[in-house]
Image (cartoon, rainbow, N blue to C red):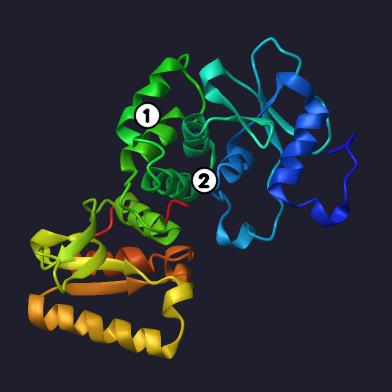
Amino acid sequence: MTGVYLDARTAHHGTTRARAVALAVGEDAVITRSLAAWLHGFDPRAPHEREQPLPLECLVLPGRRAPDRRGLATHVDRLPDDDVVLLHGIPVTTIERTVLDTSRFLRPHMGLAVADAVAHAGLINPAELLPRYDEWPPRQRWMARGKRCLDLCEPDTESYGESWTRLRIVDAGFPRPRPQIWVPEQRQGAYRLDMGWEEVRTAIEYDGEEDHSEQEDRDHDDDRRQDLHDRYGWTVWPVRKGDVLGYDMAVERAVGELLSREPTIRKRLW
């Protein structure tokens, strides 16, 4: 972005970039979307984007002069006073408004991941937030995407990977899995499954790299899933980041075999 000078060693830091935007655009603009989500503590970037700087995005009201600076994306939209908060002295969209925006404008899997994470933190109630989309004038961009995102939001979700997995399952036309299932239900000495279908005792678990990469971890996972099958009759299918964010239909085929149903799509949707 032109017109602001700063230490190159801090140029990619989210807070620094937000301060630079605030200095450059003045009082009429508010930090929004991805950068706002990051300032609220929720990274909106997919794994392959984590080394890239956050995009510079701000929001101005209709009729206000939009800043014209290279490297800055300025969006014009309705912005009630209640949708603005100060973070680190920077005007930013509130966490509720930020989720409404990221659910619309991020790619579906990242919009859902952010919404799930914010809901899991207890900062939003997706069912209460969803009707706010009706406050916008008709024919706004990506409203259907935003509404679907909040409708699919699950506060019990504990990782981005679980969000991505659930979206792949639902996009393929399979029944929506229930999150965080205890087996047995009494919980004492029980197992907790990421998501699944209790009526057929089938579950899908997302094995993140941090806790499931070592051979010892994988052996423990195998023993746990074998015990779930032998003692409780549950079939548990693990997926990893490469499966869920991959380019083929491996996840959909696996879920289809487990549920004895065919996917309703021929190629992945994101």
Residue at 43%, 16% in the rendered image? 135
Residue at 46%, 31% in the rendered image? 96
Position of residue 29 measured from the top left corner of the image (x, y, whole percent):
70, 23
Q: Nearer the viewer, residue 217 or 248?
A: 217
Question: From mark 1 to mark 2, how far is it between C-alphas?
Answer: 19 Å
Q: Is mark 1 on a helix, strand or loop?
A: helix
Q: In which quarter of the image is residue 268?
A: bottom left
Report if residue 80 is visible in the image: no
Report if residue 120 is visible in the image: yes
Q: In this view, does 227 lie above or below 56?
A: below
Q: Which mark is residue 107?
A: 2
Q: What element carries label 2?
A: loop
Q: Nearer the viewer, residue 120 or 150?
A: 120
Residue at 54%, 42% in the rendered image? 106
Q: Quadrant of residue 1?
A: top right
Residue 192 horizontal side relative to residue 106, left or right: left
Q: Of tags 1 and 2, which is closer to the observer?
A: 1
Q: In this view, does 144 lie above or below 268?
A: above
Task: For label 1, count other residues whose C-alpha is less than 10 Å away and answer few (under 14), some (14-19) or many (20+).
Answer: some
Disc 1 residue type (three-letter) = Leu
Q: In this view, does 43 lie above or below 98?
A: below
Q: Name the residue under label 1.
A: 129
Position of residue 209 measured from the top left corner of the image (x, y, whole percent):
48, 74
Q: Nearer the viewer, residue 189 or 224?
A: 189
N-term mark: 1 or 2: 2
